Image (cartoon, rainbow, N blue to C red):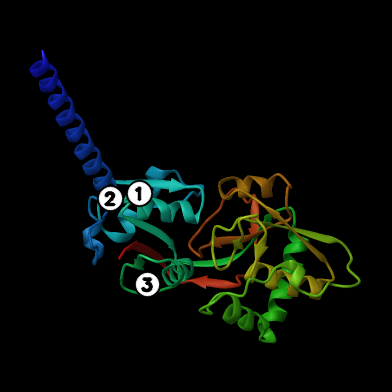
Amino acid sequence: MMRTRTKWITVAVLAIFCLICAGVRLFDDGAKVTSENLEAVVELNGKTMGGVVSKMPDNSSRILFDSILGVKLKGYRSYPDVYETLSALKTNEIQVAWFADVTADYLARTEKGIRKLEIPKASEDRLEFGMALSAKNQALKDDLNGALRALKGNGTLESLVSTYIEAEEIKPMYAKDFEKISGTNGTIYVGVTGALPPIDMVDFDQKPYGFSVALMHEIGKILGKEIRYVYLQNDTSFSMLMGGKVDVLFSYGTSKNTVDTKKTYCMTDGYYTMNQYAYLVLE
């Protein structure tokens, strides 16, 4: 009887030991999430790409980037915001993430463990970032364009770009940090999403700061308007603009090759030019 009990105790101990070893191995494998060291565009063949959600369906996005890069992607996944896209990259859910070049440059210098995939420079600029408005709001568009021309002419826009977009460290300036605009006549409601840092940035409380606030403050001074910000989800921001939730959607990209036959919205002049799409991979 004693020998039988000892035998079963030994079997039980060995079983527990095996389970512990298996658990450690599984845990260890899960911790070692790695990705190939991608160096060239051709190596994106068979990989999954991701990006911040847009109006374009995922399958259409995959076809677009297949065409741009001359590769055959395995798939494409969209995410609600920049940092969920980066999280998917860092956990190898996707192997490459695309952003506007200005955003990719910012993320590459502020986020650890990622880098830009080197690609040939585009022969011409791809997008101009400006503000989107309802097509019915032409008067405000004209006012904004007049203010942008003034800021370009006196060097203010260039200074804001240098300070809030191209600087190594972005100043965390909020609306409250600027002097109050006096003698205002009316209010402009500006939609922000945080989907295009460092052009359009919001903090964890969804409050905008940086370039969008600095530029709109200068525009408010010229037009004598109070500026109020409304945080919008990126995937519904355009419909919120069309529905009158805001007067202006601060960051919206448009190409000179884009033809919109519906004429549901209009664009201001651009305040920043994107040369090309850029791609982030793990180091």
Residue type, mark 2 in image: Leu
Mark toward the start of the polypeptide (3 vs 1): 1
Label 2, on which residue?
73
Question: Disc 1 versus disc 2: distance between alpha carbons?
Answer: 7 Å
Q: From the viewer's perspective, is the residue at label 2 or at label 3 nearer?
A: 2
Mark 2 packing: few (<14 Cα in 10 Å), some, or many (20+)? some
Q: Secondary structure at mark 3?
A: loop
Mark 1 touches mark 2? (CB < 8 Å): yes
| Residue at horizontal 84 percent and vertical 72 percent from the top | 181
Residue type, mark 1 in image: Arg
| Residue at horizontal 25 percent and vertical 51 percent from the top | 72
Q: From the viewer's perspective, is the residue at label 3 or at label 1 nearer?
A: 1
Question: Disc 2 versus disc 3: distance between alpha carbons?
Answer: 21 Å
Residue 266's disc number: none
Observer-nearest residue: 159 or 139? Answer: 159
| Residue at horizontal 35 percent and vertical 49 percent from the top | 62
Q: Secondary structure at mark 2?
A: loop
Q: Is residue 149 above or below residue 68?
A: below
Q: Position of residue 57 (x, y in %)?
A: 44, 43
| Residue at horizontal 21 percent and vertical 33 percent from the top | 19
> Quarter of the image containing the C terminus?
bottom left
Label 1, on which residue?
62
> Quarter of the image containing the N terminus?
top left
Residue type, mark 3 in image: Ala
Residue 122's disc number: 3
